[in-house]
Amino acid sequence: MSSCLTKTITSKVKERLQKYFLGKKVMTEEQVALSLNKLLSKDPVTDIEVYNPEGFWSFLPKNLLEPELLHRMAFYNGLTYCASESEVQGVFNNATFRGKRHFASKSNMLNWIELDGLKSITKNKDLRVMIAENPRDKTLVIAFRGSSNLDDYIANFNSEPVQFGENNTDTRFPLKTCPIPVDGHSRWAFEGFLNKLPLDILRELSFYLIKAFKNHMTHKVVITGHSLGGALALFFALYMKLNYPEFAVSAIYTYGQPVIGSTFFTEWMANCIGVNKIVRVVSENDIVPWVRSNSQQSHPANMPEIYVPNANENKWIACKGSLDPKCSIQTKCDAKDWTTHRFYGGLFAGEQLCKIFK
């Protein structure tokens, strides 16, 4: 399996990539409104189907696969791209979503955090994280924004390996809770993602999350992120597991998440966090989850994948890991692109969610 990055960087793809990274609209506000109205007119339980192929991971709690929950986490991720905290709270309060459990209605904003990563060039708060409380579902959600500026794109393509092993000196990730196996396999993560989360930022984020939980002790904690934010969500979940092993995280949802390191690292990481807690969602022919994937670096085969075969339809397939031939791996590299990167079951996860409800 060779990397889709080397196979698809043609002039056509470069043009698409440039348009996407320059922040040009992927959808008009009218198109976003139309897709939302389509979803709002339906019963999310009966119209969104989850197909569980025979032999699917029996250890994955079925409640993590609830279609309305898959939609809701995508909705939270879309809101992280909005311009301001007040815009997001306006969407939370919007009567349009009341009674629609698959949206994040009636949520309360707890923290809107904007910080600079370790090697930020632009110093324009390249890291954004939102912590929200959903009183109806008794859930605390911490959501990491995906790529939105130059620093984010540099992080995406910084492929320098950072080794994890018995001589690990990274104070962010003490390995006592989850020792690295001494088996001769190389375990490393991509430096670009780690540079977004220096120790001071991880400490600040964990402080806010633990404080929120102390004020909502009956709530479950969910960590989520889209694209680059999905990678950061996983590293934050790893940080919490290694530094606060007694702190219970109920689930981690990532959408359009890129490969974060070597295959042996990603499988160790998934086992450490808990493969029964992680749901990785891939939309149709989205290229982002595959740009770095090859025989040495890939998503873990032991971690479930949820595949959206048609980005505009409410159908979700529960896959037996990243190598399930019925799921995203079936799409050839030259058929993958960026156009479905923000579409999940008919929902566009982006800043237009706030603009259409001003």
Image (tube, rainbow, N blue to C red):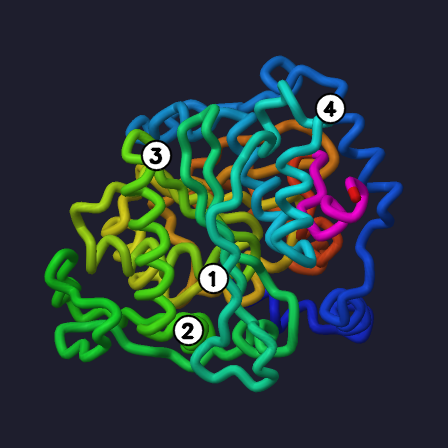
Q: Is residue 49 visible?
A: yes
Q: Give the structural element (helix, strand or loop) at label 4.
A: helix
Say what amino acid the circle numbered 2 marks: Phe
Mark 4 packing: few (<14 Cα in 10 Å), some, or many (20+)?
A: some
Question: Foreground mark, 1 or 3?
Answer: 3
Q: Earlier in the sequence, mark 1 or mark 3?
A: 3
Residue at the spot of label 3: 220
**Residue designated by label 4:** 40
Residue 285 in sight from this viewpoint: no
Residue 312 located left or right of residue 166: right
Q: Which amino acid type corresponds to the residue marked 1 in the rendered image? A: Val
Residue that label 1 marks:
259
Residue 59 magenta: no
Q: Amino acid at mark 4?
A: Leu
Q: Is residue 192 above or below residue 94?
A: below
Number of other residues with Cα within 10 Å of mark 3, as a class: few under 14, some 14 to 19, many 20 or more: some
